[in-house]
Amino acid sequence: MDNKKWYKVLDNRNTLPEGRVQTVTAGHQGICLTHYDGKFSALDNACPHQGGPLGEGSIENGMLRCPWHGWDFDPCNGQSPGGHDDSIITFEVKEEGDAIYVAIPEEESHKDTISDVMIETMVNWGGIDTVFGMVGHSNLAVADAMRRQEEKGKLQFFGIRHEGAAAFAASGYAKLTGKPAACFGIAGPGATNMFTGMWDAKVDRAPMLALSGQVNTQVVGTGAFQEVDLVKAFDSVTQFNHAVHLNSNHSELMSQAVKLR
């Protein structure tokens, strides 16, 4: 692997017992770290089917099982059984003392995405520089855009352990400072967890922006895992409420959201 960089992902190998898996981060890459048959292996954390977080799965009968739809992969080389061509990308691993390291290719030069356009609009035009939230499978691109703004010193992100806490923190921040903050969650129950805090902000007329992930467009309407009609769900607690699509006017949607406060 050329132009690679090594990242320490475990300080102590004993924190991941034999036969277990764990989600770790190496630079810009989410990793499913496995410990099986006496060796550590690093696989792309996103299942190649619907992006399920493999690090939240388990090793069953010698196979790594996706927590979303139960598909199995080899926990060491990521191969899919039966000769299918949907294997998982793997990364080089080394052990130094008790520590575990993973080699990741250096990130290619960045090209702005829809998420970059929206978060830059939120920060530069909307003046929102504080976000409370939880990063997960369905909001990774937005989280990455926030990370880039944070690296520029334009944004501060506070990770929380429950999306409800994020919404109440954003509401409380607005009440104390008079400035809006954002809360941030993943699709489905992650987003609906923010509802009570959003209602608190509405009742007290505290300015707040809520951002949420959503399931992939191609499975909307099928009752897929974590699919919720969030536009309808949040209608009673919002002044402006809109789903973002590939062909949306992305900066205008964010502008509309942040000016109605």
Image (cartoon, rainbow, N blue to C red):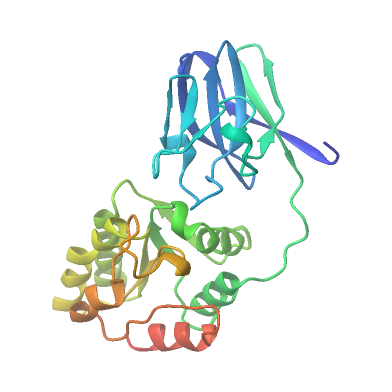
Q: Is residue 210 visible?
A: yes
Q: Nearer the viewer, residue 207 or 236?
A: 236
Between residues 216 and 250, which one lies in front from this camera angle? 216
Q: Which residue is depicted at the point 57% across and 10% down?
A: 38
Of the 4 image quadrants, the one containing the N terminus is top right
| Nearest the eye: 220 or 186 | 220
**Image vertical order of residue 119 relative to residue 9, above or below:** below
Residue occupying image coordinates x 50% and y 51%: 51
Give the quarter of the image for residue 100. Answer: top right
Q: Position of residue 65 (x, y in %)?
A: 45, 33
Position in image of residue 238 (x %, y %): 25, 81
* Residue 35, above or below 86: above
Q: Which residue is most to the right?
A: 2
In the image: residue 193, left or right of residue 120: left
User: Residue 156 placed where, x, y %?
Assistant: 48, 59
Image mark count: 0
Q: On the rendered structure, is 198 left or right of 118?
A: left
Q: Nearer the viewer, residue 143 or 63?
A: 63
Residue at image point 13% right, 77% down: 203
x, y (%) of residue 234?
24, 75
Residue drawn at (24%, 56%), measured in percent from left and top? 164
Q: Residue furthest left?
A: 203
Tell me the quadrant of the picture where the C terminus can be found.
Answer: bottom left
Left or right, 71 with respect to 154, comes to left
Residue 12 in sight here: no
